Amino acid sequence: MRHALAFAAACAVAGCASMGGGGDAAGADPAGLLEADRALSKQLLESGAAEAFGAYFDERGVQLAASGDPLVGPAQVRARAPAGVLSREPRHADVSGAGDWGWTWGEWQLHERGAGGRRLAHGRYLNVWRRQADGSWKVRADFGAADPAP
């Protein structure tokens, strides 16, 4: 399954890189997308995974995990959000030439709730984003990979 996720992520990134072309330079600026990913990460800590993912997922967005069926749309993602404290550190963003698609990647950690919560899991994520009509960004695909337990 790990190889399937890696392949799907590579295809998504390649698709974003090949889309568009010749769009306006302001629309293709990855800084705004990286800021959207940072805002999602901040909301994860402030409001929890269910509310944050519900707010930032596209209606047709898909979340793939290492096991289980894909989750489609904010309602399904919200219903299966992790119970612990999920934190993320966005590392990079890139945007298509037309500025309508982009991708980000970073690192994530899941901790138990409460002060000094024990780390339950950690890994990396790749999100494919789509710019909305109002200029905001929503997650269209979320791929996560957990590092092996120590």
Image (cartoon, grey):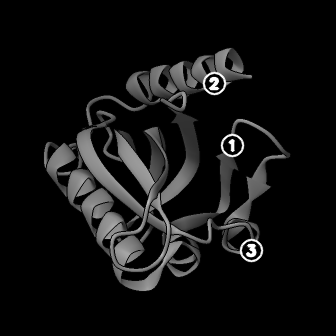
Side (left or right) of 77 relative to 48 = right
- The residue where tag 2 is placed is 8
Q: Residue at 26% of width from left, 31% of height from top?
A: 22
Q: Amino acid at mark 2?
A: Ala
Alpha-carbon span between mark 3 and mark 2: 24 Å
Characterize the local packing of mark 3: few (<14), some (14-19) or many (20 or more) Cα atoms within 10 angstroms.
few
Foreground: disc 3 or disc 2: 3
Alpha-carbon span between mark 3 and mark 1: 14 Å
The N terminus lies in quadrant: top right
Helix, strand or loop under label 1: strand
Residue 105, how many percent across, how many down?
Answer: 36, 38
- The residue where tag 1 is placed is 64
- The residue where tag 3 is placed is 79
Helix, strand or loop under label 2: helix
On screen, 126 above or below 150? below
Q: Amino acid at mark 1?
A: Leu
Q: Are marks 3 and 2 in contact (CB under 8 Å)?
A: no
